[in-house]
Image (cartoon, coloured by chain):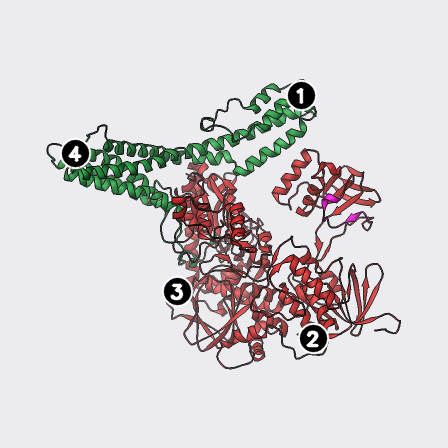
Amino acid sequence: MPSENGQARYRIAIIGSGPAGLSAAAHAAALGMSHVLIEKTDHLSDTIFKYQKGKHVMATPSNLVLRSDLDFDAGKREFILETWDEQIASGKVNVRLNSEVTAITGETGNFTIEIKGGDTIRAEAVVMAIGTQGNPNKLRCPGADLPLIQYQLDDPGEYFDEHITVVGSGDAGIENALGLAADPKQNNIVSILNRGSDFARAKSANVKLLEEAEAAGRIFVRRETAPAEVRPGELVLETRDGQETIPCDRIIARTGSQPPRGFVEACGIDFTSEDRGAFPKLSPSFETTQQGVHVIGALAGYPLIKHCMNQGFDVVEFLNGNLDLKPADEPILAEKFSALPGVRSVDQWLETFRNNVVILQELSPLQMRELMLDSTVAGYDAGEVIFERNDPGSSMFGIAEGSVQVEVNPADPSITVPIEQGSIFGEVGLISGRRRGSTVRAAEPTVVMELSRTAALKLMATAPSAARAVNAISIERQLLQMFGSGLTKTDVAELVAAAELVDVRAGQTVVTEGAEDKDVYVIRRGSMIVEKMIGGAPVFLSYLPAGSYFGEMAVVDGSLRTATVKAAIKSEVVRFPGEAFVALLDRKPALRDKAMAEMASRREVNSFIESRKDSFGSAVDMYSETARFLIDNGIGEATDVLLIDEKLCVGCDNCEKACADSHDGLSRLDREAGRTYAHLHVPTSCRHCEHPHCMADCPPNAIKRGPDGEVFIDDTCIGCGNCQRNCPYGVIRMDAKPPKKPSLLNWLMFGAGPGPGEASYSWRKKTAEKKGIESPKVAIKCDMCSGIDGGPACVRACPTGAAIRVTPEKFLTFTKLAEDAG
Amino acid sequence: MATIPSEQQNQRERRQSSDHESFLSHRNMRWLKVALVLCLVTIVSYFWIDVTPRHNGGSWYGYTLGTIGALLIVWLSLLGIRKRNISAGRWSLKAWTSAHVYLGLALIVIGTLHTGFQLGWNVHTLAYSLMMVVILSGLYGVAVYATLPASLSNNAKEMTRSQMVEALAAIDRQLQSAAQPLGREESDLVIAALEQGTFDWGIGARLSGHYRKCATTRALAYFADDWSRPVGSDEPKDKVRALLGRRKSQLDQIRRHLRIRALLEVWLYIHIPVTIALLAALTAHVVSVFYYW
């Protein structure tokens, strides 16, 4: 396809050869469209290529049909890559490897793609399928582009007799340094540089190994040191005591990677918002705000392989002029909507929801489709219950047709507040992560959509107007719910208008004892602890979960702050000016009486603790320390946590055995590991956080909150390990479901099988091989024994009463802890 | 300073929250009370009911006590199955243990009164004495369960057993390279310490915590402190001495751990096999009684 200056101009240039790019290129080749597939590395599909050897790759969602010229089904990494390589070769796909794109300029019909090294490629349309891996951060010093610097280390065994410097203090850097120094016969002199004085970002096991290697003289660890200049054969270091030059043949830079957003924006593509989780703005045919440039795959917000491959196919169809193509998810949506009353097409329903639900009006049809895939829809008759008070639930509802009634007073269900068509409800559960505050019924025949927590958070991240609307509504409703019945929207309007959202870091102080400020706060998400200085030391007074309010004492009394309130975990509070709060109290004497009564009871508790401090000082100290220890270990964000009283624990591990025997033969708790304070042990076991870290990045949305508040992983898990990496408490393990054991009786009578508890790795492996079972590694975590009558097996199976499960607001109270400490 | 929303206080709890109390004080000592009543009723009735010529296992009263005792023994021994059979249902092993302890102790009274204090060299007395051995070993078990766990936790200092072993291995690796420059005799001492297995000791050493012939102690004694050089000098001998000291204290932690665990478990090696022997002797006792009726 020659152009005016003799250089070939392709119809489509596809950047990135992951599942999305490969599928697009394969389809372009099949249609006979002129194309080029541009890949940065020297092989196709780098993300999957980098999976560990033999990894079982899953093909979820199973109800989505695959629409691609390439084959894909669940299987081993090697088989999948091999199949693709073969089909790409036999399909005559024009692949250009080792080509990193540095810029894209031009407009529809005439784009110029610049390749690192000076080459350019011209194309009429561009499809970006570069994923979210990004590029490694470069060193920021003179000489950063010299060839002795590399950003990856594939085989540490291939370097001999070299001075090697590793830059970066994360796990990747430490693991590389350890690998290079592992075999003394390679005779490498390995140094690792750390800008700070400790390795806070790395796993403690890695840090220990590094310190050991340092003590043995195998690795030189240089703390508070950064590279100042790279020269051929040497490296200038900026140390605390001035500059120093060391010999250096190779630099391994492991200083993290840059998300691809910067590059994408530089190509003229707008994102939906400033939020880190935002995606490029796309039309239904995947076109970005830069006409002629399309974005598909993980970068477009679709992390699953099947989605990516379908989009590759679709985008090429669109570019080939087939604009009537229905997305592959059409049948899934059709099935979803079939439960709703009235016969309407998928497009009609999508439009109904988008037009009627206020927070969705800004969405593109493509976003709307995706949102509906992550949501459920339902029709209710008048009077039917949508959810009940105290049901756990972190989803949000939007009313497409009809209206609902909220029973605000549990004592009298006849008192209701209406919520009209187009509005939302359930958002308090979404934001606070806590149980439903009231029962909601349909007031007339009603059609609602339920947005899963993930879908709702994604919506708020991508559509700023939706986020603003949800925030305003939730603040108003939270105030109404908190202050109880008798208040109306107009009563709190002044407060809502003056409200301000404040993010609070873990440990950050919101209110300082003795200060004169007069604001009132509501905890929207997260939790706070209240401390008071007594006898020169801070004493823990109480724990405040989300939904509590504080700071009103100083406002009502006009006194100084009586205690310090600080965040137990990363939290969000709503700040109201004190005068507006006082004005509200003045207007509503009933509310004032309620507030006064609550303040009186709190003063009583505080003075009780203060009086105990004199007579039982050590008990109070112990209680404060224990509370702080528990908060430090994640109890502040827990909803239900396993604790072990080591004054009672005999170490029989029956809890672990019971756990394994209740769940497919794998234990989800490690009793021995974990922190201990004053004989109170927090084992490695799920805390069922209010806002679970594990849910943050689950491609198939397999992590959910169950009916009893438990956070569990369903069987759509693809085994990617994201949740394991995201959990700060290390409670998720990746393992294959073991084969079934012989029964307990068989073991007792004839010694058959490995006996109670988790079987050894070798038994599991051998038996699985013998039986010919091959099961993939999936994420495994505590599900609080949901569905098992009698509740958590770990507690039921403890012979001495050492294992207890607690909720923070019940356990972190003075009476409870002081009594236990005493 | 703050108000917790009232909805939190009357939250409908669908899951059972567990009480924080030990098996000894479970439910306000419910099983202690049951056991005490059982003993009291037995003792009072023993003196109340006049059996001629004297109390013995063969009277109607003796049979009643014997039946209660035998049923109790069978039920008590089922704890071993309950513990391992993790079935669904609202059972609690703590409640079982509590009942096991108190009802097991009540057996002393029931069993003894069943004999009518007629003991001799026969299968009946064998069953009785085996029962007493089981109960006494169980009593030891209760005592160590009540007193030792805290010291297990104190000694562990947040380290798991495998972390302790790993820490020892890490010291050993450093010791190995630090000992390279030493002379033959000195390095032999270090090698002996490194080669001596941590777990290859008898039950006596494990229970008492006295490890005679400990090569690390011997090596440490040989490399006695030499104060002529400054503390922390790079002299190979000093490095080896410091590492041997760390090895010794790590070893001590592991040994204390093993000792407490052994004290917590050793009684089970009597309690369980003797229970099985007791069940056999009990069967023989019952069969023979009915055979000679």
Q: Which chain is green?
A: B
> What residue sits right under mark 3 in the picture?
A410
How far apart marks 3 and 4 lie (CA) works out to 66 Å
> What residue sits right under mark 1 in the picture?
B184
In this rendering, is residue B34 above or below A706?
A: above
Per the picture, the main secondary structure of the magenta-coloured stretch is loop
In this rendering, is residue B203 above or below A187?
A: above
- Image quarter where the N terminus of chain A lies is bottom right
Q: Report which quarter residue A5 is drawn in.
A: bottom right
Question: In this rendering, would A49 be left or right of B75?
Answer: right
The residue that appears at 76% across and 52% down in the rendered structure is A138
> What amino acid is labelled 4 in the image?
Asn
Q: Report which quarter residue A303 is drawn in.
A: bottom right
Task: Determine whether the residue tagged by mark 3 lies in a helix, strand or loop.
Answer: loop
- Check residue A157 for magenta coloring: yes
Cβ atoms under marks 2 and 1 closer than 8 Å:
no
**Residue A257: mark:** none
> What residue sits right under mark 4 in the picture?
B56
How far apart marks 4 and 2 lie (CA) works out to 98 Å
How far apart marks 2 and 1 lie (CA) works out to 79 Å
Question: In this rendering, would A242 be left or right of A660?
Answer: right
Task: Determine whether the residue tagged by mark 4 lies in a helix, strand or loop.
Answer: loop
- Image quarter where the C terminus of chain A lies is top left
**Residue A317: mark:** 2
Can you give x and y, in whole percent of width and height, for residue B149 in the image?
43, 36
Q: Residue furthest top?
A: B228
Instruction: Identify the magenta region.
Output: A146-158
Q: Residue B33: tell me if it is visible.
A: no
